């Protein structure tokens, strides 16, 4: 696997996600396993091609985060890395709250 340069730290984060693929109009269910300020990793068997534009909704802690993202890497039969491209201020605030919680949980281990 190629080394990917990350702009921000990644934290373990388990949540349900829905991914809508703009080009095909399809909607896929998946599970987020890692989260950062700039993107996430989603587990799914059928990955999308690198460069695909998607809309993602992440559901956790009775809240929903939404963003437009693109696929930056795909691991066949495993999942794909998404980079957030368009995040509203409200969703950005929710994301930072989740990351703070994840960071605190990690430091207490």
Image (cartoon, rainbow, N blue to C red):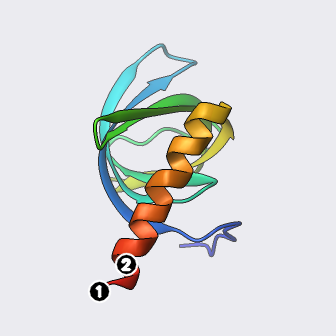
Pinpoint residue 65: horizontal percent, then vertical percent.
46, 35
Asked whether the residues under the numbered discs 1 and 2 touch, taking CB atoms below 8 Å apart as contact, a structural biologist would say yes
Mark 1–mark 2 distance (CA, rounded to whole Å)? 6 Å
- Image position of 65 with respect to 77: above or below: above
Residue in the picture at 57% in, 52% down: 39
Label 1 SS? loop
Pinpoint residue 42: horizontal percent, then vertical percent.
39, 50
How crowded pointer 1 is (Cα within 10 Å; few <14, some 14-19, many 20+) is rated as few
Pinpoint residue 46: horizontal percent, then vertical percent.
35, 40
64 left or right of 48?
A: left
Residue in the picture at 61% in, 42% down: 92
Front-lying residue, 104 or 70: 104
Residue hosting label 1 = 109
Pinpoint residue 91: horizontal percent, then vertical percent.
56, 35
| Residue 105 placement: quadrant | bottom left
Label 2 SS? helix
- Image position of 105 with respect to 93: above or below: below
Residue hosting label 2 = 106
Which mark is on residue 39?
none
| Residue 3 placement: quadrant | bottom right
């Amino acid at each position: 696997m190629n080394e990917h340069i990350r702009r921000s730290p990644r934290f373990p984060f388990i949540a349900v996600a829905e991914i809508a693929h703009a080009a095909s109009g399809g909607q896929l269910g998946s599970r987020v396993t890692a989260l950062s300020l700039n993107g996430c990793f989603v587990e799914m068997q059928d990955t999308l091609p690198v460069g695909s534009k998607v809309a993602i909704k992440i559901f956790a802690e009775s809240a929903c985060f939404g963003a437009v993202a693109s696929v930056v890497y795909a691991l066949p039969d495993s999942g794909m890395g998404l980079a957030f491209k368009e995040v509203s201020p409200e969703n950005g605030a929710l994301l930072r709250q989740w990351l703070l919680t994840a960071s605190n949980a990690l430091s207490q281990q």
